Image (cartoon, rainbow, N blue to C red):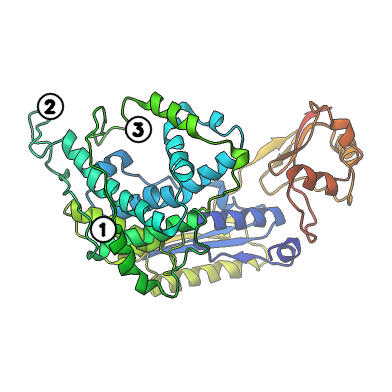
Amino acid sequence: VFHDDFWEKLDGVANAVDNIEARLYIDRRCVFFRKPLIDSGTLGSKGNVQVVVPHTTESYGSSSDPPPKEAHICILHSFPSTIELQIVLKREHCFEGYFVKHPEVTNAFLEQSDYLTSVSQNLKLPTLEILESCILERQHDFKECIVWARLEFEKLFNWKHKQLLYNFPVDFIDSRGAPFWSGSKRPPKIVEFDAKNQLHAKFVVSATFLRAFTLNIIDSEHKPSEFNSQIHAIAEAASQVRIPQWKPKDGIKIETDEKSNTKVVQYSNDDDEKIARIEAKLPKTERITFRANPVEFEKDDDTNFHIDFIHAASNIRANAYGIKPVTQLQSKLIAGRIMPAMITTTALVTGLVCLEIYKLFQTGKTLSSFKNSFVNLTLPLFQQSEPLPPQKLMFRDSEFTLWDRIDIKKGDITLKEFLVHLKENFQMDAQIIGVGTAMIYSIFDKRASQKLPRKLSKLVPEISKITIPENQRYFNVEVTAENTL
């Protein structure tokens, strides 16, 4: 849809997207086609408008907001204090771990013969444990996935809590002589699985279906038509699973310092032995035709088990720590980072956008004519500022900005014709030529001479392994060259 013809026909762009990646994509396209852009957004009572004008202002991507402060994950793992952090943690570490990262790591191992050699030593054991779970101990039918879900419940909400209390008993005194379990640190309760508990049942049911989908046991991650009749049966089957007896582990280090930036990997002292054992068991990848299905988190589809799993996992743990649980809708809003829209903020931002659009199509407007806006109706706060001009750099004796480029309109030329054009018109001897992430030409390439008579329209897709759409008219070429002047 968004091909060259689409962008060239536009007079300008007014953004209405909800994520940074989409904004940056549209910004790059507007810079390339030199189209004005009015970017705007709302977040509850907050709103902003940024004006991007070719050759006059910087682009949206020229600057970025500082990253938000985040709590140390190692502390959140063992000492949660709020349900919001629990929901984020369960999405990013449990959901993304089980159903996104694990399938991706599995496929990478199966498709790349040298994958394990590229893994750093400190990640070797976690990676091998993923492969052990998804290949050596892979489930082959739906019933086995129920067993897996039940065991994961035990590991997350029973064994993990027992290990924490083994390291730090309820009456534990720290090095300063103060009770360890005080302030924001709360001792967890040991959670025993109960098939009649709705949260427990929701966890094993959603985990079972998602595991079965990621391992290609079922074709869809969505709830089947007979789903409601399966809930009780799955929960009852989970309650019949034989659970191994828990044994405390020595040598486990649990980070307790809230100011520490050290990421602690919680493994026991026999790591090398375990690494060798798993590596010895892994089969030859060429013998395996199986591929896993990574899941893509989607908050707005209530039939896909995603929010079900995150809601159940976070609320079970919240209950264990005496934290007030939330409803499934609240879990959805937090996990999806959803801030409810306010019609008053939207109306105000829309009006500010319209004012800037009027200016874009009036002649004689300078930088000071345009205004970036930020509002916060809660305070209330209304601020406007002049957009920043684009950064100026020097090319030989001429200034240029991000809006400037060298346009070569010579049709479908060969690589050699392109090199000659650069030398004759811009006095540049090209050393490296890239299109996207593909290196099309390098003086250090032994096959460089063979590429010279090839048309760029044939050479680029062949090297980049990307099919060029029929309606694409341009290549965005980056050149590293020596000045021949």
Q: Amino acid at mark 1?
A: Asn
Image vertical order of residue 54 relative to residue 288, above or below: below
Image quarter hosting the C terminus: top right
User: Is residue 483 rendered to the left or right of residue 147?
Assistant: right
The residue lying toward the viewer, choosing from 3 and 208, is: 208
- Element under label 3? loop
Residue 140 picture location, percent across and down: 47, 53
Q: Between disc 1 and disc 2, whose residue precedes?
A: 2
Does the CB distance between marks 3 and 1 fall below 8 Å?
A: no
User: Is residue 472 rendered to the left or right of residue 148?
Assistant: right
Using a 10 Å C-alpha cutoff, classify the residue at mark 3 as few (fewer than 14 neighbours), some (14 to 19) or many (20 or more): some
Image vertical order of residue 358 relative to residue 249, above or below: below
Hey, which quadrant is residue 142 in on the image? Answer: bottom left
Q: Residue under circle 1? A: 315
Image quarter hosting the N terminus: bottom right
Using a 10 Å C-alpha cutoff, classify the residue at mark 1 as few (fewer than 14 neighbours), some (14 to 19) or many (20 or more): many
Q: Residue at x 17, y 48 (%)?
A: 190
In 3D space, how far apart are the residues under numbered discs 3 and 1 (Cα atoms)? 25 Å
- Element under label 1? helix
- Element under label 2? loop
Q: Residue under circle 2? A: 175
Residue 379 visible, this angle: no
In 3D space, how far apart are the residues under numbered discs 3 and 2 (Cα atoms)? 23 Å
Q: Between disc 3 and disc 1, whose residue precedes?
A: 3
Q: Residue under circle 3? A: 265
Q: Amino acid at mark 2?
A: Ser
Residue 126 visible, this angle: yes
Q: Is label 1 or label 2 in front?
A: 1
